[in-house]
Image: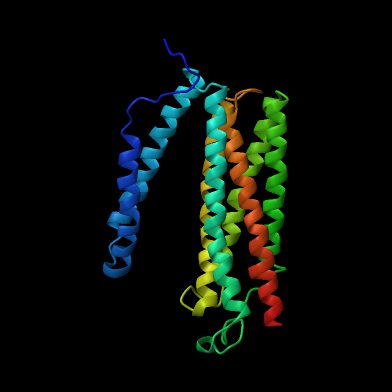
Amino acid sequence: MQKHPFHLVEYSPWPLLNSFAILAMPIGLLSMIKESSSILLVLGLVLVAVISFTWWRDVTRESTFQGWHSNMVVRGLKIGFFLFIISEVCFFFAFFWAFFHSSLAPTVEIGAIWPPVGVSVLDPFQVPLLNTSVLLLSGVSITWAHHSIEEGSRNSAIQGLGLTVALGVYFLWLQYNEYAETSFSIADSVYGTTFFLATGFHGTHVFVGATFLTVCFIRLSGYHFDQSHHVGFLAAAWYWHFVDVVWLFLFVSIYWWGSFWNS
């Protein structure tokens, strides 16, 4: 008999296989840049998606159907995900550091001026402000879904979660159209590099978060969550709030503050 509250998982092939699939992605990206061959990159993306699906399927079975996620296991999952978000904060901190370092002390290589000569920055009160409103509204809707789950109102939670996913997809569509209309590229000085790295990785996080919430939407529709069992949704909600906060910093620093310098 098990005399402890922890879940000792069985041997699983997914961590090792997923690490190889993830390794194929940057190698495939380099191959696409240098040799114009995207086969390895596409293969890596497909494998990551398939392996992640099967991995999440196993975790769902362990938590929902086998009941292995005790209170101590849930507590450990919450701590682990909190530490993951801390690592994501450090990840974006590097981009903000690069932006402010380059803007507050512009070097002679870029003309000792910020933004660099020839770079026409975006108007922060057009698409960026709309994107900000969309993400803030999605933060309200995910909170609505969270409180509905805790109150046992499943239909209300489904509505709030569905609205959040729709707003996330709308944000990505707006971001895509903004990229299509920018007058500079990632190769245009340090401004273009920091702009597209910071906003591009944020868009990637929005895509991951929307996928995360879509999985939660499917699980919520399948009666996997209740008032005392919804740690998967809780992790997705934390991640989405983190994405919202990062965008607020991006809007204020890169879009608004950057346009202020340009004027």
What residue sits 54% from the left and 70% below the top?
A: 98
Task: Establish if 59 lies above or below 105.
Answer: above
Where residue 60 appears, as percent x and y from the top left, is: 47, 27
Task: Establish if 64 lies above or below 29.
Answer: above
Where residue 228 appears, as percent x and y from the top left, is: 64, 22
Task: Establish if 38 lies above or below 47.
Answer: below
Where residue 247 appears, as percent x and y from the top left, is: 64, 58
| Camera-side residue of 82 and 110 | 82
What residue sits 40% from the left and 39% below the top?
A: 52
Q: How many marks?
A: 0
Residue at the top extreme, as displayed: 1
| Camera-side residue of 101 and 229 | 101
Q: Is residue 184 left or right of residue 49?
A: right
Which quadrant of the rendered structure holds the C terminus? Answer: bottom right
Q: Quadrant of residue 162?
A: top right
Residue 174 in view (yes/no): yes
What residue sits 62% from the left and 42% below the top?
A: 238
Which quadrant of the rendered structure holds the N terminus? Answer: top left
Where residue 24 appears, as percent x and y from the top left, is: 30, 53
Q: Is residue 49 left or right of residue 212?
A: left
| Camera-side residue of 62 and 173 | 62
What residue sits 33% from the left and 68% below the top?
A: 33
Residue 180 in view (yes/no): no
Task: Establish if 157 lies above or below 98.
Answer: above
Instruction: Tell me the colour scheme of the image.
Output: rainbow
Q: Quadrant of residue 29?
A: bottom left
